[in-house]
Amino acid sequence: MTECELLSRISEVQFVCVELNLYLDTHPTDSAARSDYFSYSKLLAELIGEYEEEYGPLQGFGHSPTDVGCWVCSEWPWERNR
Amino acid sequence: MWIYQKKLEFPVNITNPDLMMAKALMAQYGGPDSELAAGMRYLTQRFSMPDDRLRATLNDIGTEEIAHWEMIGTMILQSMDGASLADLEAAGLIGHYTMHGRAVYPADPNGVPFTASYIQSTGDPVADIFEDMAAEQKARATYEHLMNLTDCEQYLAPLRFLREREVVHFQRFSECMNILKELYPDGKQNKLRR
Ligand SMILES: [Fe+2]
């Protein structure tokens, strides 16, 4: 996947996680939603790991253990695709 | 604490900038029903919520609102990028230019700066959650007005996404209200001293 494709895949899976997270906030015992949340969270972590190995850190404060790329000089989201 | 992720929640890429939209979008960056007001409101109210589910909902929706605020800021910035003074004047943005240049600033489209008086935190969970439900409806209505102002897909796609999020947030807050009705069937969620 290109950087752009991988980022949009991350956004898709992350969106599923956001939705399930908010749903679980008011339905914390729904076991089907909990297991969906678990599997999409694992997939999200895998995709973010894959991105960071190739293109550099996506997250600050120690949450992106990668020595590729550069936190400071990678594009900011408001200049993406500009 | 919060961890920053160097990406938007939903992509924004405006290559056909529209200064009228830059001005109108300020409603959602610094107006009373803006993403900023929503985020500050929920992240502040969560401290005094009486139930884990309510604390979690306010914490997590509040966090998502900050990501929406970043999308709106990006849309405003990209809409004003490189605009000429003549075009800024034609769009009614000379007041903005004089004080802020082509920078993003939390004020509404009429230039009224953001203020904490747009939000409440009463310590009464029923009053606060009702305010949050109203806030989501007002933001949804604002997004619909914004969508009426443009035919450009570069604006419509993120606006459609953001409008839909308001609908989902309203649904979650409605569930919070049902939780409160179960917790306080007698309506005594605000302990009276005498
Ligand atoms: Fe919202």
Image (cartoon, rainbow, N blue to C red):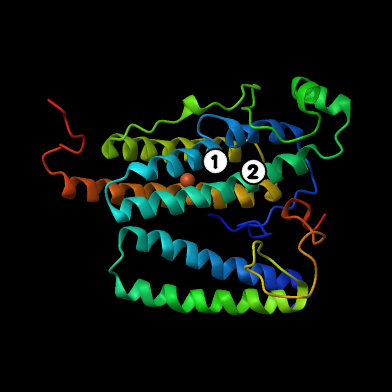
Residue B95: which quarter of the image?
top right
Spatial CA span between label 1 and label 2: 8 Å
Q: Residue at x 33, y 75 (%)?
A: A32
The type of residue carrying mark 2 is Ile
Relative to B173, A19 lies left or right: right
The type of residue carrying mark 1 is Glu
Q: Residue at x 59, y 41 (%)?
A: B147
Q: Which mark is residue B35?
A: 1
x, y percent for residue B15: 80, 49
Q: Residue at x 76, y 37 (%)?
A: B18
x, y percent for residue B189: 20, 38
Asked if the residue at label 2 sits under 8 Å from ligand 1, the reply is no
Asked if the residue at label 1 sits under 8 Å from ligand 1, the reply is yes
SS state under label 2: helix
Of pointers 1 and 2, the one earlier in the residue sequence: 1
x, y percent for residue A44: 56, 74
Residue assigned mark 2: B72
Quadrant into which the C terminus of chain A falls: bottom right
Q: Which mark is residue A18?
A: none
Pinpoint the chain carrying mark 2: B
Quadrant into which the N terminus of chain A falls: bottom right
Q: Is residue B52 visible?
A: yes
| Dot 2 alpha-carbon crowd within 10 angstroms: few under 14, some 14 to 19, many 20 or more | many
The correct choice, above or below, for A47 with respect to B124 in the image is below
The correct choice, above or below, for B42 with respect to A62 in the image is above
Viewer-side residue, A69 vs B174 = A69
Cβ–Cβ under 8 Å for marks 1 and 2: yes
